[in-house]
Image: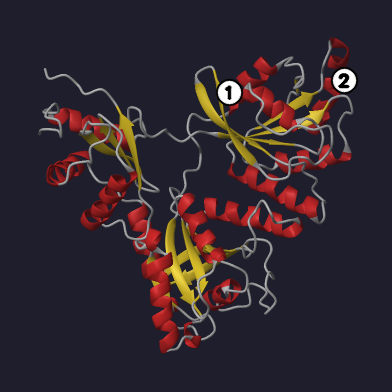
Amino acid sequence: MTGLDGTWADEAEWTALDEAAEAGELPGGGEPPQPTLAVVGRPNVGKSTLVNRILGRREAVVQDTPGVTRDRVAYDALWNGRRFTVLDTGGWEPDARGLQASVAAQAELAMSTADAILLVVDATVGATTTDEAVAKVLRRSKRPVLLAANKVDDERLTADVASLWSLGLGEPIPVSALHGRGSGDLLDTILGALPETPREVLGATGGPRRIALVGKPNVGKSSLLNRLTGEERSVVDSVAGTTVDPVDSLVELDEETWRFVDTAGLRKRVHTASGTEYYASLRTKAAIEAAEVAIVLVDASEPLSEQDLRVITMVVDAGRALVLAYNKWDLVDEDRRYQLAKEIDRELVRVRWAERVNVSARTGRAVAKLAPALRTALTSWDQRVPTGQLNAWLNDLVAATPPPVRGGKQPKVLFATQAQTRPPTFVLFTTGFLEAGYRRFLERRLRETFGFTGTPVRISVRVRERKPRK
């Protein structure tokens, strides 16, 4: 088989590219998934400072005030040639209320998705009642748990570390996040506790597929969830913003079980929201990232709003499959249908590939059509195009419509491969940069040939030197 530049003539090379893409080891392409370490503990024990020490750079915000970190934040770390992800969390208090309860919920979510947990305790204070309560929960965890005794800045405090054996989490590791004392030993222990690959890969366990139900406030998300479950699972009120926390429900739909997550309506931009709205927005974003497909509910009886477009953008940027459900269809007359069609053509150009269903949560209209739309979107989200087939198609396309000239030179496409799925991500190796308009053209033709209905498609370009002919 001949490549696009005439240099790839060996079938074995195509096979090797295919296998590398499947394994996430594409040369210069996709990265394999990394194991995750969650760093937890009560407020002001130095978690963010220790995270910065683990990373070897100042990433996490540090301040000598309890409660600076509130949301869980992920960072990439590297030690002894191994990469892993570090989740910095807010101070965890098991009996927290109000805002602190939201922070604690984020810490619990981080622990449930991590491959190992690092509990940080202030060695200068010793084990507090809160530390003991946290340790009691962690002892029941199915994840490896490490205990870091922080703020051991000199030898005089080493003897105090022994008292932390009482927490029942094994040997405490003395460390000074501020000065770096003992950080190497801690990192070696962390690598020993982390698996080579993540224990849980999204959608690989065969359990119910996760669907996030998102949209602006008062669009009918909770009403739709109640209609799907056949019970009053979520509180419904005409007042916008009734739902604050994500609500999980197992739903039997079209002879298949799905896990639906009802989320808070996104009223404002995250950086301008405050109080419970801020944390509701963060939890909604986390629910989207934890889901495999999102149903964005739009009020069909009202004009498309900026909030609708922002929610859709959030789903696309997260790389999740997408189904657009136009709710309150029982309130839509002929005039409104005409206006809605024009709004969709004008405002939703970016997501013409999304599955669309017109439903009514109040009457139950077309709710059964959601399951086929979800299946189509998820099938596309998981779809992989063999490298040989992809390049045969691309060879014909580029020959008919070559890339535009840039800087007096016409870039050539050497070859292409699909680096990963979920969402489908394609890497084009070229001799020059491809214009954004040409990449959009490639995506459009890619969808026409291979489908990918209901999922975003990502195309990246890697400029490389052309291989000399042998």
Q: Secondary structure at mark 2?
A: helix
Where 180 sits versus 408, above or below?
above
Query: x, y percentage for residue 217?
Result: 62, 69
Query: x, y percentage for residue 396?
Result: 12, 45
Where 332 sits versus 375, above or below?
below
Residue at (55% x, 64% y) in the render: 306
Q: Secondary structure at mark 1?
A: helix
Q: Nearer the viewer, residue 235 or 445?
A: 445
Residue identified by numbered label 2: 160
Question: Quadrant of the rendered structure where residue 139 is?
Answer: top right
Q: Nearer the viewer, residue 461 or 360?
A: 461
Residue 192 badge: 1
Where 359 sits versus 348, above or below?
below
Task: Specify the color scheme.
Answer: secondary structure
Query: x, y percentage for residue 318?
Result: 49, 50
Asked whether, in this view, residue 452 is left or right of residue 144, the answer is left
Q: Residue furthest front?
A: 408
The quarter of the picture where the C terminus appears is top left
Question: Quadrant of the rendered structure where residue 408 is?
Answer: top left
* Residue 369 seen by the camera: no
Amino acid marked by disc 2: Asp
